[in-house]
Image (spheres, rainbow, N blue to C red):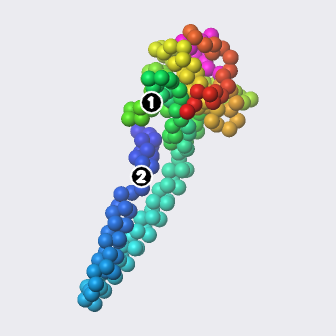
Amino acid sequence: MTNRNHFRVLISGRPASLFVILALFVLVSLAAGGCGFVPSSKADALERRVSELEKQVAELAAKNEALEQTIDRFTQTVTLYFIKNTPTEMYLSPVKRRVARTGDLFKETMEELVKGPDPASGLGPVLPADTRVLGVTVKDGTAYVDFSPEVRRLNVGSRGEALVLAAIADTLTEFPGVRQVQILVAGKVIESLGGHFAADRPLTRNETVIK
């Protein structure tokens, strides 16, 4: 099992205990300062409890910072583009996602694109789910992304195919040094993915379809 899903859990929010401690700290502070006269013994106990809570908050903050540094060291945030389909238009919508630094960040990113968006996002996938990313290489500013033949099982019209091509190109050209993208299928250049647009030439970034 990879660390990827583990990282996603960790980054979904700060440890819940930190917020619990902060809430307790506020309640104790209000009890100590907003209730009028408090017996000295009780006040001393409250002060000790507040001091303990402050220490716990500081310890949790330090642990959380170390955790975030670890996450940043082993993962990287990338931008993926998925399809938004409304009653009046279709366009690409950017989504930020963390991927594991495995040494092949381009391939990892394309695999995330194949996995598709979060089902609750209201966005649609770009590529068939059974598509495999065979590899991604970058040479002289061109990224060559090699897909398995399943990538051609697109069930989209001309507008959908245009968005698929743009999603691939726009996702990879987010990386510095990538100016254009050549799509390959099983290592070979193909004329078209879905029959509507040429795919035998490198694709450049298309900002006009992004919202």
Residue 62, above or below 145: below
Are the residues tagged 2 and 1 within 8 Å (C-beta)? no
> Viewed as shown, does residue 171 lie left or right of 5?
right
The reply to whether the magenta stretch includes residue 172 is no
Q: Residue furthest front?
A: 88
What's the amino acid at mark 2?
Gly
Q: Position of residue 92 (x, y in %)?
A: 53, 29
Q: Report the residue marked by disc 2.
A: 13
Q: Position of residue 153 (x, y in %)?
A: 48, 14
> The C terminus is located in which quarter?
top right
Q: Nearer the viewer, residue 113 or 35?
A: 35
> Viewed as shown, does residue 46 lie left or right of 103?
left
Q: Report the residue marked by disc 1.
A: 123
Residue 69, above or below 185: below
Q: From this viewpoint, is residue 166 visible?
A: yes
Magenta-colored span: 182-194
